[in-house]
Amino acid sequence: MSDRLHILGINHRTAPVEIREQVVFAPDSLPIALKALGGLPRVGEGVIVSTCNRTELYCAIANSGERDVRAWLEAYHRTGASLNDCLYELNDNRAVGHAFSVACGMDSMVLGEPQILGQMKDAYRIALEAESAGPVLNRLFQHAFSVAKQVRTDTGIGESPVSVAYAAISLARKIFAGFENHTALLVGAGETIELAARHLHSNRLGRLIIANRSLDRARELAGGLGGFAISLDEIPAHLAEADILLSSTASPTPVIGYGPVKAALKARRNRPIFIVDLAVPRDVEPRVAELQDTYLYTVDDLQEVIQENLSSRQTEAKKAEQIIHGEVERFDLITRSLDAVPTIRALREGGERVKAEILEQAMRMIANGKDPEAAMEYLANTLTNKLLHTPSQRLRQAGEEGEADIVRAARTLFDLKKS
């Protein structure tokens, strides 16, 4: 099995949310998916990174393995060839550079956002547990995490308060004069929802409701911010209270339907509801947008808001790009040097065997009463002859057959000067 690095992916730059949601891997399905991916004949290793903004398959493949990976993704999600215009494929150093850029938040919708690094670490951990990550991907991901740490330390790319959650609250601020007299219903309890909750709390939100599949987790988050918790089943009963609705769960199907929102609007006497669906697949049934007095935004709609908050990160991004470029070159050197390790090991092991054999003979000579000086001379001459016999013979053959490249390589390898 060759250890060529390959990435097959789709992200927010190449496809809208309605396409991306078709190829999302739910966290609990990853171990089985990784086993299936790694079971392909030309795929030796695999890691799957699947978030609201991207699905990427990181693989170590043999020749022509790219076709197998693409066919597997299309078959797994039953998309056929409909993804052809949305998928991108990267190999070798381009794949390395992409992995480093993703880990550093350089390829995110929000430049420099830190969440993707945690998501990559989770994906890598799951792959390790599934035993689908091997030496090639271990080296790639560990180096990517190191580069991300260096970029965070040496640049200010993560210092400005810009995130998808921040962008959502910024958009809400444009619609509401203030949050003091309003209620927000947040669905989910992951990092994005937690960030949104903290932004709202710092903006003096009047009332906060957290809905989550795990009521204990919802209570934990809501309790620290003066809110209260409900289960997902209780959402319809509380929708009419919400002026602001933000949702970000890992549900494969919508958790907020057209009917409950329509009923909530009627109970609100058509006071509008501002809705931001941050999930992929989407949490809010798309036709909710057809209802009058609803303002429904998806993660893709936040792009304009995000761009307005990025100016302070552009200069730092250039510094990060320089770091990533240098680390890609360093990774390439490390990888190429590792290709020589088996040869170096075999050379040393062979030399050690010859040394041990001749040393034993020399010691036996001394034990049998031979002059120690004669024994040492025997050891030196025999060791030199044995170590140089094979390369000398091969160089002589190369000279006879006109293989000048081997002769030049030997001069370089042994640092020989022309006589």
Image (tube, rainbow, N blue to C red):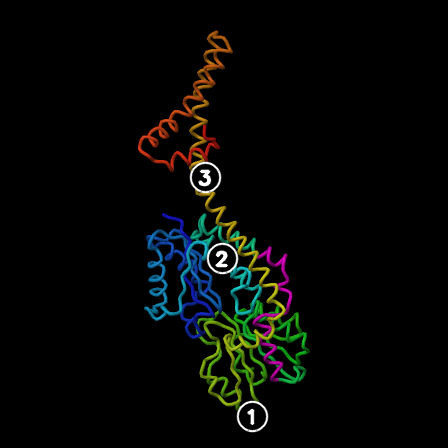
* Disc 3 residue type (three-letter): Val
Labels 1 and 2 touching (C-beta < 8 A): no
Q: What distance separates the C-alpha of mark 3 from that of mark 2?
A: 24 Å
Q: Earlier in the sequence, mark 1 or mark 2?
A: 2
Is residue 41 rendered to the left or right of residue 19?
left
Task: Say above or below: 291 vs 359.
Answer: below
Residue at (58% x, 60% y) in the render: 320
Q: Earlier in the sequence, mark 3 or mark 1?
A: 1
The disc at residue 260 is: none
Judge depth for marks 3 and 2 and give the one in front. Answer: 2
Labels 3 and 2 touching (C-beta < 8 A): no
Quadrant, the C terminus: top left
Judge depth for marks 1 and 2 and give the one in front. Answer: 2
Q: Position of residue 315 (x, y in %)?
A: 61, 65
Q: Position of residue 190 (x, y in %)?
A: 56, 68
The residues colored magenta run: 148-175
Q: Position of residue 374 (x, y in %)?
A: 48, 11
Inspect the magenta stretch and tell me whether residue 171 lies in it: yes
* Disc 1 residue type (three-letter): Arg
Residue at (38% x, 35% y) in the render: 406
Camera-side residue of 361 and 391? 391
User: Which residue does the numbered mark 2 point to in the structure image?
Assistant: 97
Helix or strand or loop: what does disc 3 sit on? helix
User: Which residue does the numbered mark 1 point to in the structure image?
Assistant: 269
User: Which residue does the numbered mark 3 point to in the structure image?
Assistant: 341
Task: Say above or below: 272 vs 399.
Answer: below
Inspect the magenta stretch and tell me whether residue 359 lies in it: no
Q: Earlier in the sequence, mark 3 or mark 2?
A: 2
